[in-house]
Image (cartoon, rainbow, N blue to C red):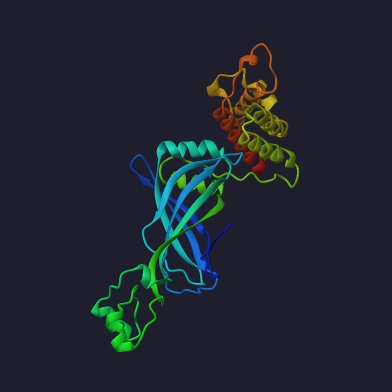
Amino acid sequence: MNAVIDLGNGDSLQLEPARRVLRLYPGAGGAQVEVTLRISKAQDLAPGVAYRVNAQMYVEDAVRRQRMLCALNAANLVTPLVRAGEVQMSGFVTDEQLRAVEQLRAGGDLWVNLRLSVSSVERHADSVNPDQHPPQISLEDVAALRDGKAASTTWIKEFLTPKYGHILLRAKVDFERPLQTQRTGDLRFDINAGEWASQMAAVDAGAFVELLVPLARGADYTSAVAALREARELLRQGNIEPAIVEARKAVEQVRDACGTQKLFAAAVKKTPRQRTYHERWAFMVEDLFSTMSGAGHKDEVTQDFEYTREDAEMLIVATAGMLKRLSVDSNSL
C-alpha cells in the first residue's frame, strides 16, 4: 500500500498511509476530512526541492467500483528527505456523502483510492540558438557573464566580441530556467471498520458499540460464533435473508444453553410485571428467534415478511449481545 512517483532523474517519491491516516472533524452540514501520508525520497538526488501534494479521494464499493468523495489539498509545501516525513491534506464531505459511504462499505472496511498530484518548480537546463532570437542583453547580463554566472538566453555580438574575442555566430548558449512540473500516482489502502466508525462518532454522524464475542467455555460455542461471522459477511454482500437465517443458528444455541423455551412457557401465563428477571430475558431470546424465523420459513403469516438491511443489522447485533451474555454465564437465564 504505497505509491512510487518517478522524478525523472533516477530518484522517486514514495508515499504511504500514516499510522492514523484519516480523521474527521465536525463541520456545518458535514465534516472536514484530514488524510495524513508519509512521504520520502528514494535517494534525494536533487535536495531542497519543495513539493505540493494534492489528491482526489475515491471510495470503493463491494465490487471495487470507485466513487468520487472529495478533493484533498495540502496547506503547506513539503521538502521530502530519504527519512520519511508527513504531509497532511484536507477536504470536506457533506452529511449525505457520509451516509453514502456507510452504504458502500456495508459494515466492512472502507477502501480508499487517492489519485495523487505532486507539483514542484525545478530548474531545467536548456539552450538557445542566437540565429533564431534577436540579440538582446542587459548590462546586468554582461556583468553576470563576466563573473561566470550567466543565465542569459541570447548573445549580443557587438558587446561581447571586444571584451571576450570572436564568438561563432551559431554558438548556442546553455542556461537554466525554472519550470513547473506535475507528476501523478495512485495510492490505495483500507481503513479499518472500527476506525472509521469511531471517526463517524466523533463528528456526530453516527454512534457505534464495540462488542467482542469470546468463545464461552473453551470451544463449546465455536459454531455459534462462526455463524455470527458468516451472518455479518452475508449482510456485507447484500444477502439480507440468508444473513438472518445464519444468525438464527447462533440464537438456537442460546435457547438450548439457557433453557429459554421452558422459561418462556411459564412466563407467558404471567402478566409482564410478574415475570422474573430470567423470564424477561427468556422472552427477548424467544422473540428474537421468532422474528428471525420468518426469513427461513415462509408460512401463511411470514410469507409476506420483507426484511430490510436495517432489520438484519439489528437482529445480528442483538444476536451478538445474546452470545456475549452467554459467554459470561451460560446459566444466567
Please tell me which residue lies in front, 98 or 66: 66
Q: Is residue 331 visible?
A: no
Using the image as rendered, state which of residue 108 and residue 116 is in the foreground. Answer: 116
Instruction: Find the residue positioned furthest to the top.
Output: 300
User: Which quadrant holds the N terminus?
Assistant: bottom right
143 lies left or right of 122: left
Left or right of 15, for residue 316: right
User: Against 278, is 179 above or below?
Assistant: below
Residue 292 in the image, given as x and y percentages of width and height: 64, 25
Q: Residue at x 54, y 53 (%)?
A: 186
Residue sitting nearer the eye, 92 or 26: 92
Q: Indicate the position of residue 190 as horizontal and vertical percent values.
A: 56, 50
Say which quarter of the image contains residue 253.
top right
Relative placement, left or right, of 13 versus 241 is left
Q: Is residue 108 visible?
A: yes
Residue at image point 66% right, 46% down:
214
Whole-percent x, y for residue 4 in the image: 56, 61
Quadrant of residue 134 within the rendered picture: bottom left
